[in-house]
Amino acid sequence: VSSPSEEALASVPIAFVVFDLLFSGESLIGMPWHERRARLESLSMPDSMIVTDVFAGDPGPIWDLVVARNLEGVVSKQVDSVYRPGMRSPDWRKIANRKLMKAVVCGYTPGEGGRAATFGSLVLGLADGDEWRLVGAVGSGLSDAALGAIRSSLDEMTSDVAVIDDPMIPKGITWVEPRLVAVVEFKEWTGSGRLRAPVFKGFTRDDPGEITWQSDGPT
């Protein structure tokens, strides 16, 4: 909404969150972060503007809080770092609160380009009683060597039986017997019970029958 009404603003309050000050009568991007921060904190802010909190010292307690509240993560900064527009810098690091889970490989999608001879992604599911639920597909985190080795194993497990009944099943899927358990790192569960931004980390020897929606699904 480009021009929200007063009623909309009252029902859904909006705050402008500020974490840095880059200009104040002059450019401040070449100034060390701690000096920019001091200038920012000296400004008088309206109630609709919030300055982010800063924590120095041992990051352990803060990280524990991030995990406990399921927050996105933290950004660590060197106190003497300057602002580098449009550039990544080792002086600033975003540490994401990512999670690990196990899921069963139920199939794979066809690969394209450099993956044409192997596969594109592994289709993952979790058992829910006598049925299987689709939780997503993972293609990131797989090296060329891993793609070839996994495809060889999958070729021995192909099945004509559709393991998962879901309208969102990827096109061109090849079903396999649900025997492989994958470990996946991901950002969060979506509202529809899918993995957001999954990354393949490896396989485990867990019994696929014990990797269920109830034990490993969203909580």
Image (cartoon, rainbow, N blue to C red):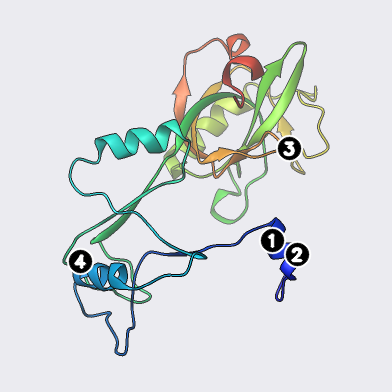
In the image, residue 130 lies at what x, y percent?
Answer: 77, 11
Q: Earlier in the sequence, mark 3 or mark 2?
A: 2
**Residue 25 location, quadrant:** bottom left
Nearer the observer: mark 1 or 3; the answer is 1
Name the disc covering residue 88, or none.
Answer: none
Residue drawn at point x = 33 percent, y = 38 percent: 63
Q: Earlier in the sequence, mark 1 or mark 3?
A: 1
In the image, residue 174 lies at what x, y percent?
Answer: 72, 33
Residue drawn at point x = 49 percent, y = 64 percent: 47
Residue drawn at point x = 18 percent, y = 62 percent: 79
Q: Is residue 153 left or right of residue 191?
A: left
- How many numbered discs sit on the rendered protein? 4
Q: Which residue is mark 2?
A: 7
Q: Quadrant of the C terminus?
A: top right
Q: CA distance from mark 1 to mark 2?
A: 5 Å
Q: Earlier in the sequence, mark 1 or mark 4?
A: 1
Query: Which secondary structure lies at badge 2?
Result: helix
Name the disc covering residue 10, or none.
Answer: 1
Q: Quadrant of the N terminus?
A: bottom right
Query: Which secondary structure lies at badge 3?
Result: loop
In the image, residue 28 lies at what x, y percent?
Answer: 27, 81
Q: Is residue 177 visible?
A: no
Q: CA distance from mark 1 to mark 3?
A: 48 Å
- Proximity of marks 1 and 2: CB atoms separated by less than 8 Å: yes
Q: CA distance from mark 1 to mark 4?
A: 35 Å
Q: CA distance from mark 3 to mark 2?
A: 49 Å
Give, as a three-letter code, the residue at label 1: Ala
Nearer the observer: mark 3 or 2; the answer is 2
Q: CA distance from mark 4 to mark 2?
A: 39 Å
Q: Which residue is mark 4?
A: 34
Name the disc covering residue 173, or none.
Answer: 3
